[in-house]
Amino acid sequence: MTYFIALVGLLAVFLLAYSASNNRKDIRYRPLVVMLALQLVLAFLLLNTRVGEAVIGSFATAFSYLLGYAAEGINFVFGGLANEGQSPFFIGVLLPIVFISALIGILQYTRILPFIIQYIGLVLSKVNGMGRLESYNAVASAVLGQSEVFISVKKQIGFLPRHRLYTLCASAMSTVSMSIVGAYMTMIQPKYVVAALVLNLFGGFMIASVINPYRVSSEEDLLEVQADETQSFFEMLGEYILDGFKVAVIVAAMLIGFVALIAMINGLFNLAFGITFQELLGYVFAPFAFLMGIPWKEAVEAGSIMATKLVSNEFVAMLNLADHKDLTSKTVGIISVFLVSFANFSSIGIIAGAVKGLHESQGNVVARFGLRLLYGATLVSVLSATVAGLFL
């Protein structure tokens, strides 16, 4: 029964993507089959084998060390503000982003990251049937972040047609940046974070190639990544440290606003209708939760968390998930994979603003297909969670 529901879930995802396709005749099915097979194999390896456990364990250990190093700097500045053994969310979860951002800056400055990203992108382009620029951008988005990634391709943005620009933006919304992966790992199990990172990479290509299919000629498929402007090492380091702090503060501000607004809306709905807004949305998203592999008795509860992520952000939803102690481990795993992406309404503004800052007219183009971006990115999350659910 589990496999039948998963099959129906996968068909539902692709039918929903197909219904929104702008060029159904150009959909290439062979790359879709190959990438779905890769998703299934990778999900099995990561979630059901000792090799996967070792990879995830190494990944989690590396980040635990990084978070420990970050704590040294945090404790130096904020030590004594919290009781021993306790740490406020901003200090314990968000401020480590500053150190991770600095580390990314060093790897970027030494040209280690650009080399890795560019050549992984080239390999992926052979699998997904898309352009090298799209493949590069997908990998770069998972490392640099959904707004910073556009800086690395700013020379090309002004020349990209609408359909290629959509794919670049879709990749940015479907993934998450390495600078906040450590924060996620303090809130949900690392194995679900790693699985989601891998599955979303392929899922983003799959959904984009159905919703927005096209072919790139060899003349168009030139990959010239924008190099950073000449900076001294310490200029770069200061910039990345400040960028990391800005991200931490922005996330904190959004959490304060969204958590407060959701609490107020829940209260108003409860007074007026005897049901909270999140519970109401839970019923809307329950069928999707069920098709992802979540038992029906938990589907409404899971759907509420999924909806919270969509209308606010993944941090709010992860905090919400932590409050639901009665969910089974399989449900927690499926929801966790679903939550690891930037697919929410606020990301539309972030991505459109990032592109607009580099190219005015292209930023306006992105804003016009913003809801279409969110639709596709949400389907990517559903697809990844459905595939992961088969092995949980």
Image (cartoon, rainbow, N blue to C red):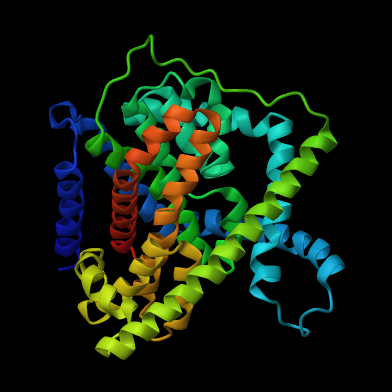
Residue 191's place in the image compared with 25, above or below, is below
Q: Where is the N terminus found, in terms of image quarters?
A: bottom left
- Image point 67% across, 32% down: which residue? 112
Residue 77 location, quadrant? bottom right
- Image point 32% across, 88% down: which residue? 270
Looking at the image, residue 124 sits to the left or right of residue 353; the answer is left
Q: Can residue 102 be seen at all in this image of the molecule?
A: no
Q: Nearer the viewer, residue 317 or 12?
A: 317
- Image point 28% across, 87% down: which residue? 272
Q: Nearer the viewer, residue 182 or 387?
A: 182
Residue 122's place in the image compared with 244, above or below, is above
Number of dots carrying numbers: 0
Q: Nearer the viewer, residue 193 or 270?
A: 270
Looking at the image, residue 313 sits to the left or right of residue 286; the answer is right
Q: Where is the C terminus found, in terms of image quarters?
A: bottom left
Residue 214's place in the image compared with 335, above or below, is above
Q: Residue 4 at what x, y percent from top left?
A: 14, 62
Q: Residue 310 at what x, y percent from top left?
A: 37, 61
Looking at the image, residue 10 sits to the left or right of residue 161; the answer is left
